[in-house]
Amino acid sequence: MTLVMGIVNVTPDSFSDGGRYLDADAAVAHGRALVAAGADLLDIGGESTRPGAEPVDSAEELARVLPVVGGLASAGVPLSIDTRRAEVAEPALAAGATIVNDVSGGEDPAMAPLVAATGADWVLMHARGPAATRAEYGDAVAEVRAELLARRDAAVAAGVDPARIVLDPGIGFAKDPTHNWALLAATAELAGLGHRLLVGASRKRFLGELPGSAEPGERDLATAAVSALVAERGAWAVRVHDVAGTRTALAVAAAMGAGVSAGDGAGAAASDEIRLTGLRCRAHHGVFDHERRDGQEFVVDVVLRLPLAAAAAGDDLGATVHYGVLAERIVASVERDPVDLIETVAERVADVALGFPPVREVVATVHKPDAPIGPPFGDVAVTVVRSRR
Ligand code: PMM
């Protein structure tokens, strides 16, 4: 089930709630109200990323957030500190936060060593520049994906445990509405990169184009709809202002997911997952003669959605999918007779995964790292999402 991260902005100027919770007691009370409304996590920030917001120095940022982190340490949910600065993150982690939510994606060179040493979770958000700017994109999804993976690689090279890393496409950060919608539509692909995926669309400007959503305070319905749709596509958590409405939207998504399972006799929600990523295969797919002749590497990621409670309760391998067998069958399906398209290969992988009876849905991605593309490129891949009907 997708988690709800409630936003606690301790700023005078965030775009939708700036100034409301600048007082520490008001911010702590707001955080507790969000937990009462069903927040699974709280994100506490002292620096607004709103276009045109006044910059704050780290002393001021710390003075805003530290009493709030301390005041919410006993709130019963994990706390994340929304900061780009290690000198703010460090005392916040010492005061009880366990997640660093870093909208710069790791620009402060002191952040990776801090995260590695403390074992905190680290949200690496994508932003090519400040929210006020507009970056140029050819293919926003491919470029954001490649840049997120580059940030991930840098973090891992600096000693951060990959399991602690959360990726975030940075909705609204130097992106226009077309980029934002493309990234939201690509949630399944981004959630299939081998890390948890956080999505922050709440009340953002691009939603203002939708009916009845002109003002930030009118965008909670649109936000809730986005949350339900990204939950269905595998987002780990959504960062929102309106926790109660989001909970309802996520309950709709979960009930529909359970309906899919119940409809074919499983009777249980299929929001549990097994992930297998980076599976290397060698095969001769492609449209060029040299590809057919010489072969090349293909890399497969799969996310299986299936109910896992019974396997866990009975510690029963028979009630789940043996990932070793899954890996072997996928490799065999990729390495058999050559085809032109990685679309065809991805479909084969999805078929293999759905061949395991408990699997309700599969997200299958096939990468072709050495594809014959002239200009230098980061990655080319195809993702298919297939459900049991
Ligand atoms: N958006 C804002 C601030 N922090 N953190 C993450 N990880 N993802 C986001 O999309 C994100 C963020 C800006 O929104 P706000 O002013 O409402 O807090």
Image (cartoon, helix red, strand yellow):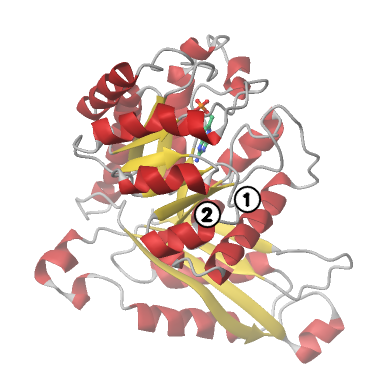
Provide the residue designation for mark 1: 107
Whether residue 75 is visible to the viewer of this picture, yes or no, is yes
Is residue 211 toward the left or the right of residue 90 in the image?
right
What is the crowding at mark 2: few (fewer than 14 residues within 10 Å), some, or many (at least 20)? many
Q: Is residue 384 above or below residue 321?
A: above
Badge 2 marks a residue whose secondary structure is helix
Q: Nearer the viewer, residue 134 or 252?
A: 134
Which residue occupies 43% across, 34% down? 239
Badge 1 marks a residue whose secondary structure is loop
Question: Residue 367 has which mark?
Answer: none
Whether residue 233 is visible to the viewer of this picture, yes or no, is no
Which part of the image, by quadrant, shows the N terminus? top left
Which residue occupies 80% across, 90% down? 293
User: Where is residue 325 shown, x and y percent of the image?
Assistant: 37, 83
Q: Is residue 269 above or below residue 246?
A: below
Which residue occupies 36% across, 16% down? 23
Count of numbered circles on the image: 2
